[in-house]
Each structure stands twice: as C-alpha cells, then as structure tokens.
Amino acid sequence: MIHGRIDKIAGPLVVATGMTEAKMFDVVFVSDYRLIGEIIELKEDKASVQVYEETGGLKPGDPVYQTGHPLSVQLGPGLLTSIYDGIQRPLDKVREQAGDWITRGINIPGLDHEKLWSFTPELEAGARVTGGEVIGSVPETELIDHRIMIPPEISGEVTFVIEKGEYNIDTVVARVKTGAGETTELKMYQEWPVRKSRPVTTKLAPEEPLITGQRVIDTFFPLGKGGTACVPGPFGSGKTVIQHQLAKWADTEIVVYVGCGERGNEMTDVLQEFPELKDPKSGKALILKTVLVANTSNMPVAAREASVYTGITIAEYFRDMGYSVALMADSTSRWAEAMREMSGRLEEMPGEEGYPAYLGTRIAEFYERAGKVQCLGGERIGELTVVGAVSPAGGDLSDPVVQSTLRVVKVFWSLQAELAYMRHFPAIGWLDSYSLYTKNLKPYYDKHFGTSWVLAVRKAMALLQDESNLLEIARLVGAESLSPEDQLILFTSRSIREDFLHQNAFHPIDTFASSRKQQLMLETILLTYDEMTRAIAADVHPREIFDFPLSEDIAKMRYLPEEEIDQITGLQKKITEAVNKKMQLENDWEVEK
C-alpha cells in the first residue's frame, strides 16, 4: 500500500507528501527500489526522510511506503562474530547476495532466522516474572552464554516454557499472561528502537578500572568499568590504533566496535586482525566476543548517523545480560558531520561551525547510555564502557564536537601531534590528559596493588611535571649546569617516558602489559630514582651516578614475557647493590684522600 509520494529530493534527504499517518523516526521504504529511510521531520502532511542508501535515480512522484515502526535492531543469538553495516545489515550476507558492493534496496534481517540454537530453559510454567528476567540460555560462542531475556515492558505469569532442545530464533520459547489478561508469545530474539535507551533498575558508580594493558592509560589516566572516555587528536596521532588496542586487550566480556565514517582500509585491518587475535583471558579467538559495525567513509552518509545508535543498542543488550561491555566509536566526529549535513538539508538554523544547535544534546544522550547498572529482573550487574574517538580538524581542541564531548565524559586522553612526530606512541600527552575516576578507584588500587601504588603514580607524575619546568632552563643553560638533583629528575623522567610510557602496539610482547608488570616496571624506575637520590646525598659524583650499568636492563623490562616478569624483582635488588657499590667506592676514595 502506498502512503505517500516523493515531492523533493536533496541528496540523502527526501521530502514526501501525503504522510498524514506518519510518526517521527518511523522507517519507510522509498520508491520501488525499496530504499530504507527514516522520518526525521514532520510538517503537516509532509515528511522529511533520511534515506540510508544512494538516492540517485529517484524522481518526484515515486511512491513512499510506511512501515509504522521506528528504526530498530534485532537482538538475539547470532550477534557475536557478526559484521554489520550502519543499519544492522550483515555484510557477509550482503556480499553473498550482491557481490563486493552493496547494491540498493537490499533488506536482510540482522539475525539468521534459520540457524538452530541449543536452548536451555531456566524458568517453569507458573512463575511470576518481570521484564529483564532470564527465560533460558543459548551457548552462542565458546566464550559467551547468550541469556534470553523477557522484554523490559512485559511482566506477568509464565504459562508455557519450551523444553530443552534445538530451535531457531523464531520459535516461541515461552508465553506470559500479563495483568491485563493478554498472552504474549516470547521468541529467542526481541526488537528494540535504536534511539531509545534500554531501561535499568539503577545506575551505580564505577568502582573497578578497565584494565587495557596500555601503561599510560592504566597507570596515569584509568577508565572505570562503566565509564566514558574521549580520545581527540589530529590526523596521524594514533586514535584508531588506540581504539584497536582497547578493543583487543580491554578486560571486558563483550566488545562492540563501531567504525563510523573511517577509511575503508582501516576497517579492513580490523576485519582481518580480529579473527586471528586471541583473547588474553581465555586464549580463544577474540572475534568470539566481538560485534563489528562498519560504516566506512564511502558508504551513505545518513547511515553513518545511525551506526552509532545501532552499536550502543547492541552493547546495552549484552550489558542487560550482566556482562561487562566495551563500545569503541571511531569516530564521533564523522557522526557529528553526518548530523551537520542532514541539518543543513533540513534548512535548520546552524549552530557553531555549522553543526546543528542540538549537537551537544545528542552527544550527551549517547554517552549517558554508558554506565555500571543493576539490570532489570534480577541482581545482575552489567557495565557498559564507552570510548569515543574525536577527529577535530587540525587537532583543534576548541572544536564544537570536542568541547561538547568533554562536558559529559570523565576521562580525557589528549593525543599530541608533537609526540607522534617524535614516534612516541601512544601519543597521549601526560600533562594535558586527565581522569576523574581516580578517587572512585582508589579503594580498588589499595586492595589489589597496595596502599603505596597511588602515591607512586603521583610521584611519577610529579617528576614528569618537574621535567617540563626544567627543560626550559636546560635549553638555556645546558643540562650539566643544573644541580645534581635536577639532573636526576631529567634522568628519571626520561626513563619514565621512554621505558614505561612508550609502548609498541605492533610488538608481540610490548603490545600488552598486565597490571602486575606495570606495577613492577614503575616501582623499578622510582626505586632507581630513590637510590640515586641517596647516592647524591652521599656526594657521589653525578657522572658516576648517571653512567648507570643497569639502564639497559631497565629499558628491556617491557620486552619481558608475562611469565618472566619476576625477573624484575631481581633487577631491583641489582639496582640497590649497584648504587651501594658506587657509594662504597666513593667512601673508600674519601678515606684514601
């Protein structure tokens, strides 16, 4: 049935007339090509439709078909290991049907409705249930049990539960009689509007750090599980590599990676790497706990705006099962640019730099969907951590997207072009970045690292700050003109930068450092500083101190495999012995003199 006709076409924006029954954000099919679109503005009987496919060849008078449903994703077994486009079309199925290029009008469901899954019920008939409770489970991959949940809006008495067996996702696995006397049939999957956040019982404060294996992040600027972080930086500073590292090594049970408007070759690297990578916890393939959403820069711009919502809705679904989920969005700048383009075509009043006036609201709504929560329907605790990369033009941090993001996130990893040019990666500036989770995470560090850890981190950061102040003086008068104490600060800070903060993402060992290894490495560098301070106090000549025979061993710590990091404890003893030896030689020389 035709519900409207095309009146005007402006790139991906189509204006249709005769849309009196339409609702905001409803999905429509445009023309006989059946192009997927979403209503983003209504005026009288006219609807402005954001079309998620190429609109070439459309003409005024072509039909517009309404569905009466908002843009939604299918949530159920089969999400993991999948690679979707921005509106949850599985790209492997698209390729089978259309070849290497996505042709127009393809409408493939997000889940495989024919594959059989092994369902095990966890409820019995007669049970009283509310939204979010678990009906049963499906072993989706070797790493993850998929919990089939009652949709949030449904509650009542279970009248039927299917027995254990192999079923497809369209099978009715349970029936619930609601308080109104209606019977609702529940399948293995549910549909959820992407622009609507999934409800929770309550939100909790993050109390555990997200261990990423990246030393500069875990040690100096930690991110709490269920927290939010922003990674802005100029072109070439390593935003995508950091996102890849977090997706590979972050201590989470589920990873959702959204490539939003990035170059196709970067997404190709992700798609090629992930099946070969091993999960550090289980040793199994990392792809078994991963969902990829790929909307590259050569795909329709409108679908770019939807891809971020698709990704976070899938992430919320796994969070509701009680899992710890990490969402990587690379990059939210491309998402904001898609909003700007659509806003311009709607002829809305532009805000700063042409972005729509509601840019800040949309960004805040996105990041607010993160959090550590008590899930509906039980005592399960789920965590959704969101890390968004931002690509401001020229690395300008006054960019509206960066500023709107910084207002809502609590961790800021500032990528510096200067560090990238010096080949220092990750190029996160230690004097500009910050984390607001440090106070929340202190009890965790005190329990698992000892009460001295937070003090050690502060001491290292103070040394780096002192180095920044001393470098200006050293450039003017030379480092040798500084006092021995100041020379030692420069010596130690260089060791912190080069031996600890610098990390090679492409080295098989250095790419990931466990919490224990990070602790031993930093403690060793600070121990060297303390021992050398003791030697300076004993009047040992600076040249003798800085010509340190164990400097090379300190630099090699990061290349020690995890099973050999106990060698670092032995190195600490050698450092103390070496300094004592120098002090003894100095003392003997004084006696002889």
Image (cartoon, helix red, strand yellow):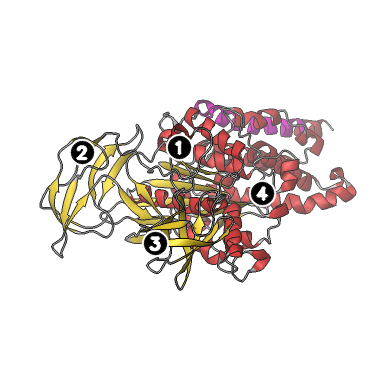
Label 4 SS: loop
Q: Earlier in the sequence, mark 1 or mark 4?
A: 1
Magenta stretch: includes residue 575: yes
Residue that label 2 marks: 120
Label 3 SS: loop
Q: Callout 2, which amino acid?
A: Thr
Q: Nearer the viewer, residue 126 or 582?
A: 126
Q: CA distance from mark 3 to mark 1?
A: 28 Å
| Nearest to viewer (mark 2 / mark 3) | 3
Q: Which mark is residue 415?
A: 4
Q: Earlier in the sequence, mark 3 or mark 4?
A: 3
Residue that label 1 marks: 94
Residue that label 3 marks: 3
Percent position (x, y) of residue 556?
64, 29
| Nearest to viewer (mark 3 / mark 1) | 3
Percent position (x, y) of residue 542?
80, 39
Q: Which residues are magenta?
A: 561-586
Q: Is residue 283 left or right of residue 362?
A: left
Q: CA distance from mark 1 to mark 4?
A: 37 Å
Q: Are marks 2 and 1 in contact (CB under 8 Å)?
A: no
Above or below, 421 against 43 in this view is above
| Nearest to viewer (mark 1 / mark 4) | 1
Q: Earlier in the sequence, mark 4 or mark 2?
A: 2
- Mark 2 burial class by Cα count in 10 Å: few <14, some 14-19, many 20+: some
Instruction: Please say whether residue 267 is visible from this viewpoint.
Output: yes
Question: In this figure, what is the number of numbered marks?
Answer: 4
Q: Earlier in the sequence, mark 2 or mark 3?
A: 3
| Nearest to viewer (mark 4 / mark 2) | 2
Q: Given the current orientation, which residue lies at the most extreme bottom position?
A: 44
